[in-house]
Image (cartoon, rainbow, N blue to C red):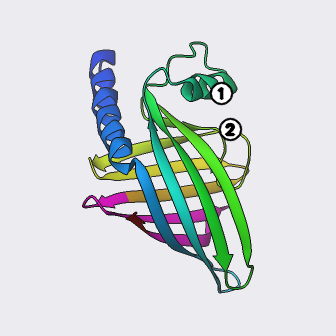
Amino acid sequence: MTILSPAIRLSDHSQSETRAEEFFRQSHGNWRSQRRYYTLKNDTVQEVVSSITVEFLPFGDERLIHLAQVHGLGDETLLKFGALTTWESDYVGPSPRQVNGSTVFGVLGSSLYRDRGFNTSSPIIAHYTMGDNHTMTLHTEYDGNVFEEELKLVGSHYRVRQTIISRAQEQLMIGQYLENRI
């Protein structure tokens, strides 16, 4: 077993943060999202079309400071950078409805702090890895659910995403997304 010194671990986090920052900067802008949620138990498909805006948040942004406060971080300036994502969604198919919302993301080390989760309005923490500058993988757990998500930038005009939601080691839902920059 190899034990890494704190300096090596910090270096690893710095490289991960650098890649995540580049990913967030490249995601900045307006997107049209087309997605499908497949509920595996009852074999239903929910289609959603959304307008999404991603705003890059630099170090010191007041929304990052507020996010640090919500999470009870001792130093309100710990979050290095982040993003504000807002959306207007039209659900079509079996459960039509309109949904608007927003979430703030902040990065510290390999953690992605959020002011809310996919299925909760409570603050959550996801853990991320960067496969390269174009692919972010997230792992989030709360309320007995596990969320595994991969986001990939495809060139400068497209993003693809896939989310798998599980509970008690059983996959419940798969979400697949194609997003194009507008």
Q: Residue drawn 52% across and 64% down?
A: 163
Alpha carbon separation for disc pair 1 and 2: 7 Å
Magenta stretch, main secondary structure, is strand
Q: Callout 2: few (<14), some (14-19), or many (20+) C-alpha neighbours within 10 Å? A: some
Q: Position of residue 98 (x, y in %)?
A: 72, 68
Above or below, comparing residue 40 to residue 179 in the picture? below
Find residue 57 and name its label: none
Q: Position of residue 96 (x, y in %)?
A: 73, 78
Check the image and name the residue furthest to the top: 75
Give whichever of 100, 116 is nearer the camera. Answer: 100
- The residues colored magenta run 152-178
Instruction: Tell me, yes or no, whether the highlighted magenta stretch contains residue 173.
Output: yes
Q: Earlier in the sequence, mark 1 or mark 2?
A: 1
Whether residues under marks 1 and 2 lie with C-beta atoms below 8 angstroms apart, the answer is yes
> Which amino acid is tagged 2?
Pro
Above or below, comparing residue 156 to residue 33 in the picture? above
| Residue labelled with disc 1 | 71
Give whichever of 66, 118 is nearer the camera. Answer: 66
Q: Residue drawn 71% across and 53% down?
A: 144
What secondary structure is found at the residue carrying circle 1?
loop
Find residue 123 and name its label: 2
Q: Quarter of the image holding residue 125?
A: top right
Q: Position of residue 80 (x, y in %)?
A: 43, 25
> Which amino acid is tagged 1?
His
